Amino acid sequence: MKSNTTTILVAAGALLVGGVATAAFMNNRPSSGDFVANGEPAPRGLEYADVVKVAPITQREPQYAQVVNSAAIRETTTSSSPREVCRDVVVQERLPERDGNVGGTVAGAVIGGLIGNQVGGGNGRKLATAAGAVGGGFIGNRVDRNHVGGRVVDRTERQCHTENANSSSSRVVGYDVTYRNADGTTGTMRMDSKPGERISLGDADNVVAYDVTYRYDGFEKTVRMNDKPASDRLPVVDGQLVTQTASTAGDRGVRVDAGSTRQ
């Protein structure tokens, strides 16, 4: 009997607590009439704004590429210059038998004088003898000079001639560099000096943001977004535009854009 009484009391307590909670909730919940009376519109839920125009915002920034390979370009030149080349060689020659300036001349003069003495008489014979001696001496000298005789000897003679000497040289005149861009594409360029780990490609216009014009409730507004819209519609929650924004390099969040829109 005591157990049944306890059970009934617990059930009654539960009903009482539930009724109080329900009454409090109903009293505190605002009605639709309250929204209208206070000038606050009722929640509208999820809607969409139509994207009218997307204008990229760019700024000049230096561009760099990663060096993949660099090959040296060599230039070879050949030159020719004359030079004298000399060497010692052994030659043979025959020595004369006698002095051609004395022996041949004397013998020729004697013979010529004897022949001249046989011609004419008196003074004519004397003149013929003298002429024969002179002529015989001259002839004897020439004959003795042309005479080949005596022993053969060896002697060293230095002989020289001119030759053209060719020489070649090689030098590095540049480098063919293969590089990889930030988007993964590759290219090749020629450089005067060997590059490091990366090379500069100059300045270029980089897209840093987008000005997005959208239409909602008959009005057009523009909002700046970090990323280009993925579709031609943007979500609107309770009358406020929702955009995607990158807070960090690898983290993306959802932002409700309420105050940054502009006419």
Image (spheres, grey):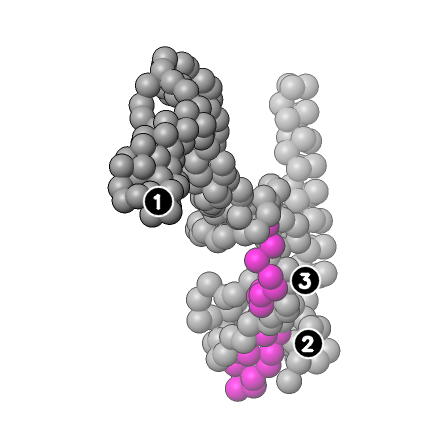
Q: Nearer the viewer, mark 2 or mark 3?
A: 2
Q: Nearer the viewer, mark 2 or mark 1?
A: 1
Q: Which residue in the structure is indicated by mark 3? A: 29
> Which residue lies at the image location 41% right of the left edge and 25% below the top edge?
103
**Who is closer to the viewer here, 127 or 263?**
127
Q: Name above or below for residue 166 compared with residue 245.
A: above
Mark 3 lies on a secondary structure that is loop
Q: Earlier in the sequence, mark 1 or mark 3?
A: 3
Predominant SS along the magenta part:
strand
Q: Earlier in the sequence, mark 2 or mark 3?
A: 3
Q: Which mark is residue 40?
A: 2
**Who is closer to the viewer here, 251 or 86?**
86
Write the start and end of the magenta stretch as one range.
199-223
Residue 254 falls in which quadrant of the image? Answer: bottom right
> Which residue lies at the image location 56% right of the left edge and 86% below the top edge?
219
Q: Position of residue 221 (x, y in %)?
A: 59, 81
Marks 2 and 1, Cα distance to the nearest angstrom? 178 Å
Q: Name above or below for residue 121 compared with residue 141.
A: below
Mark 2 lies on a secondary structure that is loop
Q: Earlier in the sequence, mark 2 or mark 1?
A: 2
